[in-house]
Amino acid sequence: MLARWKPAAINTRPSEWSRAAIGMALGTMLSVWLCAQVFGMEVALHLLGPLGASAVLLFAVSSGALAQPWSIIGSYLCAGIVALLVARVLGRTLGSACLAAGMTVVLICWLRCLHPPAGGLAMTLVLADPASAALGWHELGAVLLGAGTLLASALAYNNATRTRYPKGAAEAAPVLMGVAPAPADPAITAVDLKRALAEMEQFYDIAPTELEQLIHTAENHARRRSIGEVLASRAA
């Protein structure tokens, strides 16, 4: 039981940590600075927490589904609209802030733009400081400006540092002509997956053991589908 609490190893090198840390710092600073120029420093600092949390995903876990462009833009837009509506109808209380966060999660799951910092953003907007509350619906502009600037920073910085972003469709492996077919592939283990992740030098938010279980489960489904197709062809 205690072994389950042991943190999983991070399959990246210190150079990747430094790359992500520099990008996060620069991206967050640029987002807050630009927002402060347009809406004031009080409003910008009020958004610092959610923007910093989003920066961790966009720069350190840029390959994850939670860090893709639609995830941050869509989730920030949903959180902003829900929070401002709840604040207008129910007032700026702790209960309404928690309700706004819960409604935001449902909406972003439905729209396929799940992004964890959006829950904190919704609560932050409901419990806004006087300067932010005075903006009314214009506060949504500050939210989108911060998110858009952070996204633009991630697009520029990640690709400039040879980290492909946003995540693209997996490219098919090239077919080698004139090569004899290989023998049956051995079973993939968590050790193999851990070594592969280390070679890719990017952080993926999944443990090797969980990835191993996922692969084996997919193989079982593929095997059952293949058997079903064979039986169906024989019945025909």
Image (tube, rainbow, N blue to C red):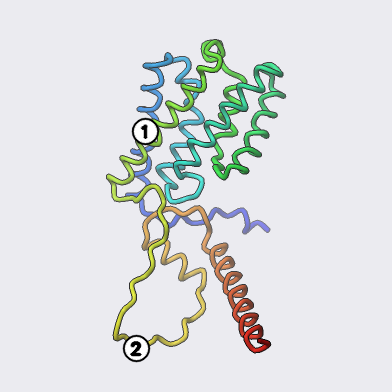
Q: Position of residue 14 (x, y in %)?
A: 35, 50
Q: Where is 229 relative to 4, above or below? A: below
Q: How many marks?
A: 2
Placement of the C terminus among the 4 image quadrants: bottom right
In the image, is 230 to the left or to the right of 151? Answer: right
Q: Where is 62 relative to 141, above or below? A: below
The answer to which of 133 and 234 lies nearer the viewer is 234
Q: Position of residue 121 (x, y in %)?
A: 56, 29
**Residue at (58% x, 22% y) in the render:** 125
10 Å crowding of disc 1: few (<14), some (14-19), many (20+): many
* Closer to the eye: label 2 or 1: 2
The amino acid type found where label 1 is placed reads Gly
Residue at the front extreme, as displayed: 236
Residue wearing tag 2: 180
Q: Where is 177 relative to 105, above or below? A: below
Q: Which mark is residue 27?
A: 1
Q: Where is 207 relative to 138, above or below? A: below
| SS at badge 1 | helix
Q: Position of residue 172 (x, y in %)?
A: 39, 67
10 Å crowding of disc 2: few (<14), some (14-19), many (20+): few
| Earlier residue among tags 2 and 1 | 1
